[in-house]
Image: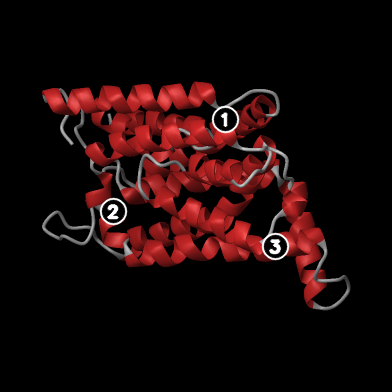
Amino acid sequence: MDFINAVILGFVQGLTEFLPISSSAHLLIVGRLLGTGDDPGAAFTAITQLGTETAVVIYFWRDISRIISRWFSSLIGRIPRSDPDAKLGWFIILGSIPIVVLGLIFQHAIETTLRSLWIVAITLIVFGVLLGVADYVGAKKRKLDQLTVPHAAGFGFAQALALIPGVSRSGGTITAGLFMGYERAAAARYSFLLAIPAVFGSGLYQVYKSVTEACSVASDTCVPETFGPVETLVATIIAFAVGLVVIAFFMRYISKRSFLPFVIYRIALGTLLLIMLGTGAMQS
């Protein structure tokens, strides 16, 4: 049964990672609804994100290789440091700092307290409303070649909010981008590029922890993991395959349409979750 549940959760991860609806929230919710009553765990979530982030690398490979090449070229003086792609490399490094620092500082809370479904429900609603407001009032005129240092820092702190399940990594950064006046597609593209260092760093760290540390039920240092390495690997592969399809769909979708359907979905899901928790139909 654990294998089947892992397959389902891998599909959920791939389906929700790139949509601004929070993949970590959906893994928590679906994990409870599968009948095991278990939290899939922070490590399972982080490792399966390696699959979806690999999909990002493949989809944006031309952008990524160009940015890395131009960034290195600027370091050795072959091109000006003012080159847009070279600057984008520096901005991604700058924007990755907040989530690394805050992730280390609040690691215990992230793996335990912040995984409460009460918190998930509230963040789904609050950040759903913020996404809707940002999409409505944002100028949507700026392109990525207009990115500045303050805006790069703003994107970075917005991404760090995704350490809280229910916020959504893409949703948080896209919301910040819209508030700062960026086009929908530009904000989404930068959101996915910015996530690469953080997601790979977190996922590989959790792989290291799962190999070198035993998570004891009696210990208060982590939440016991539900799935073993085989189930987690299968879920990661499925997340990659589904995520590659979803990211292609999402980039086409937002080039012509608003985020309103995702806003409505977030508010509806958060409200339903609050009702289920309040009536005892689901435990937090």
Give the residue number, with chain letter if any, for mark 2.
111
Name the residue rendered at 74%, 64% in the picture.
87
264 vs 79, nearest the viewer: 264
Name the residue rendered at 15%, 32% in the picture.
283
Residue 34 in view: no
Q: Quadrant of residue 3?
A: top left
Q: Secondary structure at mark 2?
A: helix
Amino acid bearing label 1: Tyr
Give the residue number, with chain letter if any, for mark 3.
89
Residue 92 in view: yes
Q: CA distance from mark 3 to mark 2?
A: 30 Å
Q: Which mark is residue 136?
A: 1
Amino acid bearing label 2: Glu
Q: Position of residue 90 (x, y in %)?
A: 68, 66
Name the residue rendered at 44%, 22% in the picture.
264
Please indicate whether residue 40 sits to the left or right of residue 149 in the image: left
Q: Quadrant of residue 151?
A: bottom right
